[in-house]
Image (cartoon, rainbow, N blue to C red):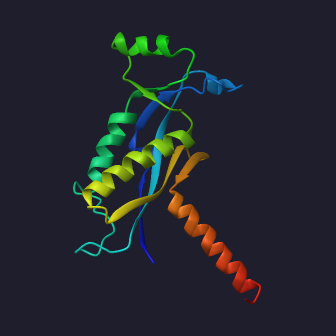
Amino acid sequence: MSYLSTKTYSNARGLSCTSRQWAAESDCNLLHGYAFGFHFVFGAEQLDKRGWVLDFGSGGFGKIRSWLHEMFDHTLLIARDDPARAELEKLGELGIARTRIVDGTSCERVAEMTFRKADEIVREATGGRCWVESVECSEHASNSGIYRSAAAVNRGAISEAMQDDLDAGK
């Protein structure tokens, strides 16, 4: 069994970020912005000396908070494969945008990137005692994408199989 805790860094925090989905067949292929929000699920087999999965202050979540602001606060996300990448990067060179080159600009890809960075930070801060189960990235209250760890997906599948066996009377 493991312990879980959550941290929500809501859209109201003001991580105002601009991007575009260049391959979209809608207005999403134009530059547009959102105040990203994030919901983290952290896991640990053992609690720390305070009875916590993760310290949400400077000793744990603080480094994630700093990274979130560095990546998403008043920045322009540019997909690595965007055909207009060179032109968009010029905005940074001109000093009118803080550009960030990323693998993808969808909520799903932003959730994955954030998951990987947060997991790295958390494992280092806790000596491997704690990990990230999932990260949800939301553009606003109606749209979000979630990235879950392989271990979380496997635990869910095992749990479902066990429930199926119970339901079948096995």
The number of numbered badges drawn on the structure is 0
Left or right placement of residue 98 versus residue 103 in this view? left
**Residue 72, image x, y percentages:** 40, 35
Seen at 30% across and 59% down, the residue is: 56
Seen at 43% across and 15% down, the residue is: 89
**Residue 109, image x, y percentages:** 53, 40
1 versus 116 height, above or below? below
Left or right placement of residue 125 versus residue 147 in this view? left
Compare residues 143 and 83 and report the one nearer the observer. Answer: 83
Quadrant placement of the C terminus: bottom right
Quarter of the rendering containing residue 43: bottom left
Compare residues 127 and 113 and report the one nearer the observer. Answer: 127
Compare residues 159 and 7 and report the one nearer the observer. Answer: 159
Seen at 53% across and 51% down, the residue is: 147
**Residue 118, image x, y percentages:** 37, 50
66 versus 28 height, above or below? below
Left or right placement of residue 101 versus residue 152 in this view? left
Seen at 22% across and 57% down, the residue is: 59
**Residue 151, image x, y percentages:** 51, 62
Please identify the residue farthest to the right as the structure is shown.
Answer: 168
48 versus 110 height, above or below? below
Please identify the residue farthest to the bottom as the structure is shown.
Answer: 169
Quadrant placement of the N terminus: bottom left
